[in-house]
Image (tube, rainbow, N blue to C red):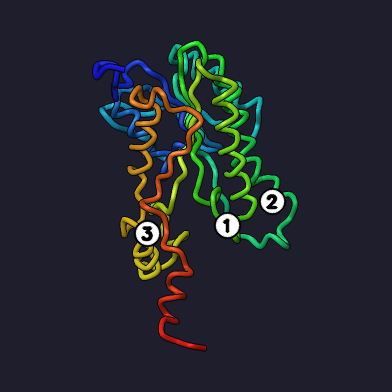
Amino acid sequence: MSKTDVSWDFTGKTVIVTGGTRGIGRAIAEAFLAAGANVAICGRTAPDDLPEAGGRAARFWPCDVRDAAACKDFAGAVAEAFGGIDVLVNNAGGSPNVEAATVSPRFTEAIIALNLTAPIHMAQAVHPWLAERGGSVLNIASVSAIRPSPGTAAYGAAKAGLLGLTKSLAQEWGPAVRVNALVVGMIATGHAAETYGSQAAQDEIAAAIGLKRLGRAPDIAGAALFMASSAAGFISGASLEVHGGDERPLFQDILHRHAGTTE
């Protein structure tokens, strides 16, 4: 690949970002807009305002990504509006904290549907256009996929499955379509207090991260832009860890507290 083959310009490209109305998804949508792309976002309800950058705004379609038929209709509408699809970012997901021993089967199934089944449905829906245009899929996973996830066990299992899906689709759909994942660490969005507690708690968590801060939504957006660009043209089936160096292991703090004790 020559230097002239590498481009961060997405002018004329069409990008779908599921869950692109807020948080990380919104930042990803804004990054692609700034890079010149047409951006389609979806959700179950329309946002109060749309992601904007570069003097342009994303377009919103209502879509429950857990519904395969709805995903197919959404993909068709986007392709008709923009003439095709080049990138899919499977960002929609999440889970509240629950006790695995007592949570209802219905809740567990809903979490797996949102975080694993939905990305499968959406990837299948957009595949014809991606294959035609040499596009790519980017799955937004989590560090919960690669370490224990107490309190969000079903979520962690679903995100681990998403990493497996990434590798399998990269093999099955290559060379026409690249498929990758981002393994996202602890990110402070507009609702950081709901996830990480008080400012004091957030500061203590940040101190345990290699880069000594919580991540920000633009950190993930920048990684997404790279993975979808021609700069990542030989990257497929990969999981890029975007977690700021991850967390200091708890056992080291325990050893430090007990250093010098004999019993």
Residue for point 59% across, 44% down: 160
Residue underneath mark 3: 209
Sooner in the amino-acid sequence: mark 3 or mark 2 = 2
Q: In this rendering, which labeled residue sits more in front, label 3 or label 2?
A: 3
Q: Earlier in the sequence, mark 3 or mark 1?
A: 1
Q: Position of residue 258 (x, y in %)?
A: 45, 82
Q: Is residue 64 visible to the viewer in this orientation of the structure?
A: no
Residue at 60% in and 60% down: 151
Q: Tell me the distance, in whole angstroms, between the alpha carbons under discs 2 and 1.
A: 20 Å
Q: Element at badge 2?
A: helix
Q: Nearer the viewer, residue 198 or 162?
A: 162
| Position of 95 relative to 38 (above/below) | below
Type of amino acid at the residue the image marks with label 1 = Pro
Asked which quadrant contains residue 98, the reply is bottom right
Q: Identify the residue position indicated by label 2 in the image.
A: 107
Residue 53: quadrant of the picture:
top left
Residue 190, image x, y percentages: 38, 52
Going by the numbered disc 3, the residue's amino acid type is: Ile
195 left or right of 162 in image: left
Question: Does residue 116 sit above or below 212 in this rendering?
Answer: above
Check disc 3 and report its element: helix, strand or loop: loop
Residue 234 percent across, percent down from the top left: 41, 24
* Residue 203 seen: yes
Crowding around mark 1 (Cα neighbors within 10 Å: few <14, some 14 to 19, many 20+) is: few
Measure how far apart labels 3 and 2 are at the Cα level: 31 Å
* SS class, disc 1: loop
Three-letter amino acid code of the residue under disc 2: Phe
Give the labeled residue for mark 1.
Answer: 148
Badge 2 or badge 1: first in the primary sequence: 2
In the image, residue 20 above or below residue 177: below
| Residue 108 x/y as whole percent | 69, 50
Image-based side of 107 in relation to 216, left or right? right
